[in-house]
Image: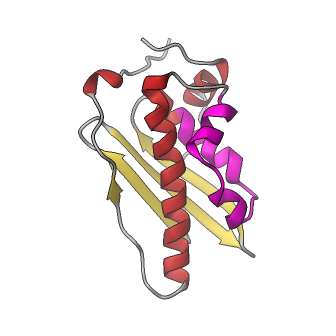
Amino acid sequence: MPVYSEKVMDHFQHPRNVGEIENADGVGELGNPTCGDIMKIYIKVKDDKIEDVKFKTFGCGAAIATSSMVTELVKGKTLEEAEKVSNGVVAEALDGLPPVKMHCSNLAADALHLAIEDYKARKAGKGPIGRVETPEHDEDEHDLLEHA
C-alpha cells in the first residue's frame, strides 16, 4: 500500500468544499469508470474570479484528497491563475503523492480545467462541453484507504 503524507490523509479524511453548486457557471467531469475514479468539479465565477468551487468525487483516497486540494488552491483566484494549476502543483501542495497515485492529481487538475473550459463555452453561447473520460490505468494501482 502506498505511503501518504499527512496533508493527503487530512484532505481525504476531512475534504473541503464537498458538494454541488446549483446553477454552476462551469462543470468539469472526468473519470474512468473502469478503475472507479470519477470527479466532478463545479465553479461559480464572478468578475473573472472563482467565487465558489465544489466537488464530488467517487474514488480512492488520493482522488478525494487531490479534488479537495484543487478546490482550496483555486477558490478566490482568477480564471487565469486557476488555469495554471497543474498536476504537479496539486501533488506539491499535498506534500507529494506516491508515483502510482500521480494519475489522481492529473484527474483533479484536468477536471478543474474542464470546468473552466465549460464556463467559457457557456459564456460564448456554445453550451456545456460535456464529459471526457481518461485513459485506463492498471487496476493494481487502485487501492482504497479505509477510515480508522
Q: Is residue 141 left or right of residue 77?
A: left
The image position of residue 131, as x and y in percent, is 35, 62
| Residue 59 picture quarter | top left
First to last magenta residue range: 65-94
Residue 76 highlighted magenta (yes or no): yes
What percent of the width, then of the height, locates residue 98? Answer: 51, 21
Colour pattern of the rendering: secondary structure
**67 or 148, which is in the foreground?**
67
Residue drawn at (49%, 52%), measured in percent from left and top?
110
The answer to whether residue 20 shows anywhere in this view is: no
Q: Is residue 139 left or right of residue 50?
A: left
Q: Give the residue displayed 29% in from the left and 21% down from the top.
A: 140
Question: Splitting the image into 4 quarters, where does residue 57 fall?
Answer: top left
State whether the magenta stretch is mostly helix, strand or loop: helix
Residue occupying the far left of the picture: 34
The image quadrant that residue 146 belongs to is top left
Residue at the spot 51% in from the left edge and 69% down from the top edge: 117
Does 80 appear above or below 7?
below
Up/down of 143 relative to 125, above or below: above
Give the number of marks: 0
Residue 74 appears in the rendering = yes
Instruction: Give above or below for 139 relative to 134.
Output: above
**On screen, residue 91 above or below 116:** above
- Taking the magenta stretch, the answer to whether it contains residue 24 is no
Depth check, front residue: 54 or 3: 3
Residue name at image x 44 percent, y 36 percent: 103
> The N terminus is located in which quarter?
top left
